[in-house]
Image: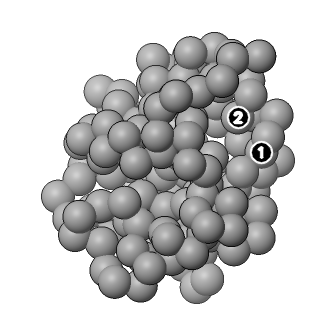
Amino acid sequence: MTTSTTTTKDAAREFLDHRRIAVTGVSHQPKGHGSNAVYTWMRDHGYEVFAVNPHVDRVEGDLAYPTLQAIPGGVDAVVIGTSPEHAQETMEQALDAGVRSVWMHRSFGGGSVSDDATAWGRAHGLTVIDGGCPIMFHPDGDGFHHAMCHVLTWTGKVPRTV
């Protein structure tokens, strides 16, 4: 097993430099879904985002795609916002689609993080951020997200390195 030397802050900066980002787990019923908040925030801040949900055609007023491979033109990065049980499948889709940067969303609780999927992704050369939220690391993120970044890093829910 290798030890990582990339800080999460650096990995997050590289992730956020991508402009075409898929978000999995975006729900057609957005109440309480963190992936919907990430999706709409990124969309409203100039990212070209793509909702991935194999069960619906539209979410948040936009087209939804059943898989990463179904997104026309592909994407550069993916936020996993599904339950951890679906993370491995998304990692495999990401690798197959040529995506090298994956973020597993987590604030409180387990979120979307799967330790097995994280290890698998890293073993296959993907950069995997296993915790936190992209909004926490974005310079335009709100004060609540920035404060939560500090708290969740302190408690270990956001890793210090990836």
Viewer-proximal residue among 66 and 24: 24
Residue 151 in the image: above or below residue 82: below
Label 1 neighbour load within 10 Å: few <14, some 14-19, many 20+: some
Whether residue 2 sits left or right of residue 143 in the image: it is right
Viewer-proximal residue among 41 and 144: 144
Q: Is the C terminus in the top left, top right, bottom left or bottom right quadrant?
A: top right
Q: How many marks?
A: 2
Amino acid type of the residue that numbered disc 2 sits on in the rendered structure: Thr
Q: Is residue 60 visible?
A: no
Q: Is the N terminus in the top left, top right, bottom left or bottom right quadrant?
A: top right
Residue located at (75% from left, 57% from top): 83
Residue 67 in the image: above or below residue 148: above
**Residue that mark 1 sits on:** 114
Cβ atoms at labels 1 and 2 below 8 Å apart: yes
Residue that lies at the very extreme toward the left in this rendered image: 46
Amino acid type of the residue that numbered disc 1 sits on in the rendered structure: Ser
Percent coordinates x, y for residue 88 in the rendering: 74, 34
Residue located at (48% from left, 45% from top): 8
Whether residue 95 sits left or right of residue 59 in the image: it is right
